Image: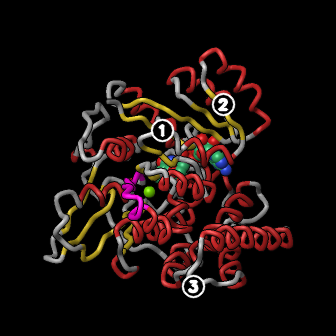
Amino acid sequence: MKKRVAILGSTGSIGTQALEVIAANPEIFSVSVLTAGNNADLLIEQAVKFKPEEVVICNEQHYERVKAALYPFSIKVYRSASALVSVVESDHVDVVLTAMVGYAGLLPTIHAIKAGKDIALANKETLVVAGELITALAKRHNVSIYPVDSEHSAIFQCLAGEAENAIEKIILTASGGPFRGKDREFLAHVTKAQALKHPNWSMGAKITIDSATLMNKGLEVIEAKWLFDLNASQIDVIVHPQSIVHSLVQFEDGSIKAQMGLPDMKLPIQYALYYPQRLKSDFPRFNFMDYPSLTFEKPDLETFRNLAIAYEALEKGGNAACIVNAANEIAVDAFLHDKIGFLDISDVIVESLAKTAFIGNPSIEDYVQTNEATRRFASEMIQVKV
Ligand code: NAD
Ligand code: MG
């Protein structure tokens, strides 16, 4: 029996790489659902090639075109984000790969878990916003959440065979992004083109900016807390510019295990989709002779404030991380539209965290409202700035 995969966000960086993995292993995987935000042309192309049962195009403007193109193949086509929550529940889905970006992943992930579907989780924002709720829900529905994020996949791989052994701490590696070593004076004038040039990874625009501000690492610290049931004090971050050591786990005897390899998201994607087995691959192999020095340094939390803000939100608990995530999404979008500068991103988040109502024990409705209220506040703040 093939594993039937639903990909939310199939036209993005993770989505297209997941389809490469699936295309390379046609006897193991099939595609049952594909969804995209705007890129109708690529969605059509993917659907014609992989013949899913169902397709969702979130931007309704493209619906008629996608529907007409896929009519000859008897592929059902749905429009708008509301369709995402129902396609993940279909009987012909075994695992849902959440590869869409941002808060928009939250509701489809909740529906998938409630329908008993395993999750291959790339959409880290879902765990940042509502990690407590999501992990409790997964437990209740006996659903597994397999990390796709390379650092969390590294930790997950290091934990194989260690079920009896407690984690003392984990060490998340960070490349440091394109502005590693720079000061705030330099950052005040950086452009979006500079910020979009990641040294080691080619990714979607939002996560690339998050990597430049170190918010990506902050989101990953929160993601790790929920995936591996840790306290903030058990999660360290170290800058490792070569991105070869993908992360590390330290056990209670002091032993440290690391997972290494060339930066290539296809490996964590296929590990998440086919766990616990490893799939043979022809990905380029790492050679120590090409990397005579692997280096490590402390992150600069004063220059890159977003990482410190994320730790603060984690300590605070409740809806704090939801506020940070929403404000960050609005601020990054504004930076990508040349409305604010690079350093303003942190200001928008700090101010939003200070001004949005704190809720200690949020329900799903509270998260929805917190997200909306924060977006409103952050957008108004940006409006005043420009
Ligand atoms: P991307 O921008 O390249 O792709 C996003 C996909 O989601 C596209 O298919 C887009 O059409 C769809 N989408 C975007 N907004 C949507 C919305 N509101 N509703 C429905 N669909 C929407 O992003 P990406 O780089 O592939 O990242 C996807 C997720 O994976 C993010 O949460 C990111 O943090 C995480 N992630 C990515 C990488 C990477 O290497 N790209 C690594 C680790 C984690
Ligand atoms: Mg990562």
- Say what amino acid the circle numbered 2 marks: Val
* Position above or below: 356 against 131: below
**In which image quadrant can residue 192 be found?**
bottom right
Query: Of 219 and 283, which appears nearest the observer?
Result: 219
Work out how far the residue at label 3 is from the one at label 2, CA to CA, in angstroms: 40 Å
- Say what amino acid the circle numbered 1 marks: Asp
Residue located 48% across and 38% down the image:
91
Residue located 47% across and 72% down the image:
132
User: For the C terminus, which image quadrant?
Assistant: bottom right
Q: With 327 as the anchor, is 122 left or right in this view?
A: left
**Range of the magenta residues?**
138-148
Magenta stretch containing residue 147, yes or no? yes
Residue 334 appears in view: yes
Q: Position of residue 291 (x, y in %)?
A: 27, 49
- Say what amino acid the circle numbered 3 marks: Gly
Work out how far the residue at label 1 is from the one at label 2, CA to CA, in angstroms: 17 Å
Residue 360, disc = 3
Residue 120 appears in view: no
Q: With 51 as the anchor, is 288 left or right in this view?
A: left
Query: Of 263 and 294, which appears nearest the observer?
Result: 263
Instruction: Rate crowding at label 1 as few (under 14), some (14 to 19) or many (20 or more) other CA atoms within 10 Å.
Output: few
Could you tell me which secondary element the residue under label 2 belongs to?
strand
Residue 91, disc = 1
User: For the N terminus, which image quadrant?
Assistant: top left
Q: Identify residue for label 2.
A: 77
* Position above or below: 314 against 38: below
